[in-house]
Image (tube, coloured by chain):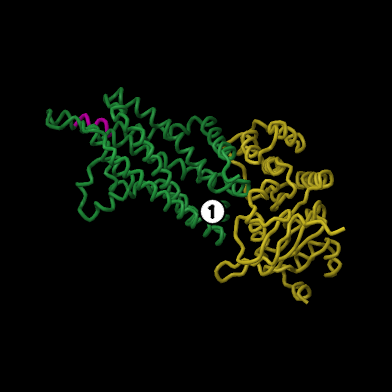
Amino acid sequence: MPFSFHTVSALVLRYVFLYTRHPVRFVELVFWPLVDLLVWGFLTVYLQKSGAGEVPTTITFLIGGMILWDVLFRSQQGVAISFLEDVWTRNLLNVFVAPVRTVEYVAATCLVGVLRVGVTLIILAVVAALAYGFHLADLGLALLPFLGNLMLFGWFLGMVSTALIMRWGQAAESLAWAVPFFIQPLAAVFYPVSVLPAWLQPIAKALPCTPIFEGMRAVLSGQPTPWGHVQSAFLLNLVWGGLAAWFFAANLRHVRKTGLLVKVATH
Amino acid sequence: MPPATPILEADRLVKIFGDSTALSGLSFSLAAGESLGLLGVNGAGKTTAMNLLLGLTTPTSGSVRMFGLDLWKHRIEILRQVNFSSAYTSLPSNLLVWQNLTVFARLYRVPQPQQRIAELLELLDIAHLRKSVTGTLSAGESTRVNLAKALLNKPRLLLLDEPTASLDPDIADRVRKLLRRLQTETGLSILYTSHNMRDIEEVCDRMVFLHGGKVLAEGTPAEVQARFKRKSLEDFFIGVARGEIEAIGLE
């Protein structure tokens, strides 16, 4: 049997226990996104008021960008923080000597990412609608592929973060939070790619999330759903997924060969 | 009648980390129902050996077979029949004891997991800890919870890495007696590393003493003692650590 959903569900159960036993863990899922939403929301309100009608209402893309960025970020965190939880609690060796395939372990962390995104997204969507009149559903049919592509890219960044932490150990733990922000300036979250210097634009266009944020702005500007952007994001995700899987597997082989896996797990 | 396939066979295991050779051709086997102690002074290679046997580290050369199967080709199938407990790992401290055991019971596909968990908690005399937060347990309680996790799947082979480290003599004695009883009653095979010679004398049928990544001595504790003319296993250990015995062993 090459892949077991039973094993994945057992690993996810551990995180369900963790989050339901410690409601304070929900603060992490809710507090920072809400702070971001309030800052960007009030900035949007201020720009709209001070522009005296000259600033287009589509400036709400700041709120949209913030919410969709959080989808990517929480998805990446689901993978990277789940791994770190096992390191912090010195449980990693117990998991690695249990009958768990690497692909099942990664799948479980991805699923935890989906759960984290679900909780955060619902809360942000409700607060954005009530406080700023921003309705995520205005993105229409494109919303689901937008979310799906961002979630996929978040998983892949999470796998890269985890691989780097395995390789460099405790000193690299901050990468679990830093990796998404390495790409944020290029990801066109709050401004179009055309704003970037010409030499940076090809790099920005190689990121699967860039066409999603560009597409979001197009929809919020009243243009038709840019399905081409969705397609580009998906194709780029296929490439990034392959590279992330290769990078993760290569690093796992390396840490098994050098003994670093045990060092990371028992530090 | 042909001899039964050993439960565990380590064959010419070599592990080199950069310029340092941690194991240089380690070979040994473990029969069904046997309890084998893996000993050595710090840096002898026993932790490296344990990590190779668990599949956590890959060997530079050599092979590990369990139940007649190659560890790296049949890892999942093998790990379902093996379990592990170490003084250097713990179960997630932020979950309750029953939650941790439930997760691992599912990972090991234990039938009727709650019944099995209750049985083990009774056996280890920690039923009262079922709803305790794992991180609040004493060292002795934590060791017994780790042992409960290690026994969940009724393993055919149990790998124990210094299970009595940090236990008081009373709890350590109870753990040793329990392991001996389990071995007798269930035919469990045990590979045991320890710095506590009393553990080895009481729990192990046979021992392999590593030094500098090689086997320095092998046999029953009494045989090893007699061969090296030492009054106790502890005396033998000290002799190796102080360089008094190595020359005899390598002759």
**In the image, B242: left or right of A38?**
right
Secondary structure mostly taken by the magenta-highlighted segment of the chain = helix
Please identify the quadrant where the N terminus of chain A is shown.
top right
What residue appears at the point 65 percent right and 59 percent down from the top-left corner? B47
> Mark 1 is on which residue type?
Val
All told, the count of numbered labels is: 1
* Rendered location of residue B50, percent (x, y): 67, 57
A45 falls in the magenta region? yes
Q: Quick one: A126 or B203, which is closer to the camera?
A: A126
* Rendered location of residue B240, percent (x, y): 74, 68
Q: Colour of chain A?
A: green
What residue appears at the point 65 percent right and 33 percent down from the top-left corner? B98
Q: State which region is magenta.
A: A39-46
B98 falls in the magenta region? no
* Rendered location of residue B157, percent (x, y): 74, 50
**In the image, B103: left or right of B236?**
left
| Above or below, comparing residue A66 to residue A253 in the picture | above
Q: Seen from this angle, which residue lies furthest top?
A: A130
Q: Quick one: A59 or A222, which is closer to the camera?
A: A222
Q: Identify the subunit bearing mark 1.
A: A
SS state under label 1: helix
- Colour-to-chain, yellow: B
Q: Quadrant of residue A135?
A: top left
Q: Quadrant of residue B14?
A: bottom right
Q: Quick one: B52 or B171, which is closer to the camera?
A: B52
* Rendered location of residue A142, percent (x, y): 31, 33
**In the image, A141: left or right of B7?**
left
- Is residue B203 visible in the rendered image? The answer is no
Residue named by callout 1: A264
- Is residue B25 visible in the rendered image? The answer is yes
